[in-house]
Image (cartoon, grey):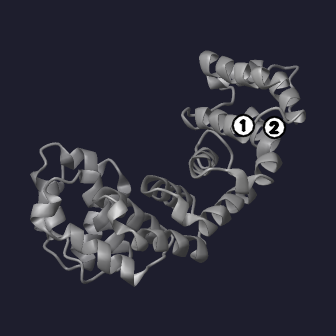
Amino acid sequence: AAEGAAELLRAVEREGVRGGLARRWAELEKLQAEEKLTCDQIARLFEMCSRVPSVDSGGPRSPSADLTEPPLSTKLVQLFSNFVCERIPELTPEQIRIFTVALTSQALPMDEFWLFMLAKRVQDTAAAFNAEQIVVIARRYAEKGLEDEEFFQALVDRVTASPQDFSPEQLAHFLLSCAKVRYMHEELCTMAFPLFEDRSRVSGMRAGTLSAAITAASLMDQRAFRPTACCHALASMAQAPRGVFDHHEFAMGLVLAAATFCHSAGIIKHLMP
């Protein structure tokens, strides 16, 4: 049975997740009914799903198709939801990251109960997660507007307890995640925002990192933050303007920097395509 589950995963990966799942759905249901798949194998399957735009058929349904039957993506989440939720304490931090990414991806429907259970596990064991896992999980919950003060407090505690674990890029995007759900923590802000005020420090940072920091400061109304160093660094990047303004949040951050922090709009002109 274990070999059957492993072979099915190899076949789905080989054939492509959309076609492989559709062709082998009955086999997958049978294996899961017998509880032959491990949480690690299920996580691997969900990771494959998170890498594609959709696991559902893009073409029209055949006339003989059951119109009441849910799409494959919904059936996949429903097939494994209870099984995994009953085993949340057994999941590794990396498996929790994988499920979080998959359940907030465009390929699968968002299962709020499953995400709630994952969040509670993260909240209770945040110290076990590495920096990248913390940042990715925070970003995914924030992008879906899943606000939970205790959850984000636990993530912030993990960051402030070991700030050396987090790169400036990770801190910038973590700050932006907190800002999106309107969670502001004074200690975090005091620790992190000064990193983006020093021209010598920000000169080697990526455009996305700088823009995320500016946007976060704007949304958090951090009036003490001086965005000039970040703005000048962005202006000096030959390819930065289009890359920055392709994302509306980053453009909004620069506009808010000029309005909220009362800085010259001339800085913004340097960044326009």
120 lies above or below 246: below
Mark 2: amino acid: Pro
Q: Residue at x 30, y 72 (%)?
A: 192
Q: Is residue 237 above or below residue 72?
A: below
Residue closest to the eye, 162 or 50: 162
- The residue sitting at 23% across, 51% down in the picture is 206
Q: Is residue 101 above or below residue 186?
A: above
Q: Is residue 232 left or right of residue 86?
A: left
Label 1: how many Cα within 10 Å (few below 14, some 14–19, many 20+) = some
Q: Is residue 19 visible?
A: no
Picture coordinates of residue 112, whole percent (x, y): 71, 58
Res 240 label: none
Q: Which residue is mark 2?
A: 70
Q: Is residue 157 visible?
A: yes
Quarter placement of the N terminus:
top right
Quick check: 222 left or right of 139? left
Q: SS class of the residue under badge 1?
A: helix
Report the residue at 25% width, 64% height from top: 254
- The x and y percentages for residue 70 are 81, 37
As measured in the structure, the alpha-carbon distance from the residue carrying label 1 to the one carrying label 2 is: 8 Å
Considering the numbered disc 2 on the image, is that residue within a helix, a strand or a loop?
loop
Q: Locate residue 209, reporting x and y percent.
A: 29, 56
Q: Label 2 near label 1: C-beta < 8 Å?
A: no
Q: Which residue is mark 1?
A: 73
Quarter of the image holding residue 73?
Answer: top right
Residue 40 on image: x %, y %? 67, 39
Q: Quadrant of residue 62?
A: top right
Q: Nearer the viewer, mark 1 or mark 2?
A: 1
- Residue at the image position 85 percent from the left and 36 percent from the top: 35
Residue 99 as seen in the image, left or right of residue 272: right
> Number of marks in the image?
2
The three-letter code of the residue at mark 1 reads Ser
